Amino acid sequence: MNKTNADAVAMLTELKAAVAGVENVGIVIGAPFTALSDAVKAVEGSNIKIAAQNMYPKASGAYTGEVSIPMLKDLGVTWCIIGHSERRTYDNETNEKCNKKIVKLIHNDMVPVYCCGETLTQFENGETKKVVEEQIRVGLANLCEKCISKVVIAYEPVWSIGTGKNASKEIAQDVCHFIRKEVAKLYGRKVANRVIIQYGGSVKPNNVREYLTQPDIDGSLL
């Protein structure tokens, strides 16, 4: 929940100029709902995509305060973040709710960025993989092999979001590798190898490279 519409456009205009000529790198900015329309216009002609930070799985109806896929697509938004740790923490975003959203996004030709990760208590209790396995198994259910390859998965441990703490590259690689194995159990190894898996959690310019050199980390969620 940052950036007014004007602030977002100014930032994206600067970013567009900064990444002009950059190739073979996907750049996606999750703008607030109030800035989405102008954000899409601000990045026209560049390799930057705009994502919504959430959506509701119904196309329309008596769901005051929610935003639907048709509304997002009408603005030119093609990506959407699902299950962010803050929404899981503050808004009861369950794995089941995430799954309904992911299925709808895929069926409407949008790219879901599905976030998963454990709390500090779960991490300290050695429950990371148990938690993440459940998030992957339930959150990514009911998809075909072709569909799952369109999902971007982001491992973002809740204990590292906004705390200044970050998982070591070894921990991040281990969990991302585990995620890929869980996807392979559900949809096969060939599909799992095509899925983009990111690490997010206090990623900064001075540490991003060490994460991106890991074999199962394909990008970062900042």
Image (cartoon, grey):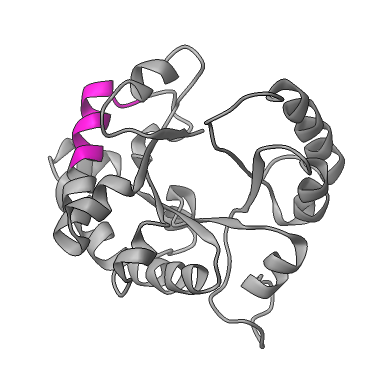
Q: Is residue 157 above or below residue 105?
A: above
Left or right: 194 in relation to 208: left
Q: Nearer the viewer, residue 144 or 197?
A: 144
Magenta: predominant secondary structure element?
helix
Question: Picture coordinates of residue 150 (x, y %)?
Answer: 42, 57
Quarter location, residue 88: bottom left
Question: Picture coordinates of residue 41 (x, y %)?
Answer: 82, 48
Q: Residue furthest top?
A: 206
The region drawn magenta spans: 166-177
Is residue 180 among the parts visible in the rendering? Answer: yes
Q: Is residue 180 above or below residue 167?
A: below
Left or right: 90 in relation to 118: right
Residue at 28%, 38% (x, y): give it.
120
Left or right: 174 in relation to 45: left
Residue at 51%, 16% (x, y): give it.
205
Q: Is residue 146 above or below residue 60?
A: above
Q: Is residue 173 shown in magenta? A: yes
Residue at 42%, 74% (x, y): give it.
100
Question: Picture coordinates of residue 167 (x, y %)?
Answer: 30, 27
Question: Picture coordinates of residue 59 (x, y %)?
Answer: 62, 82
Q: Nearer the viewer, residue 187 or 177?
A: 187
Q: Residue furthest right?
A: 6
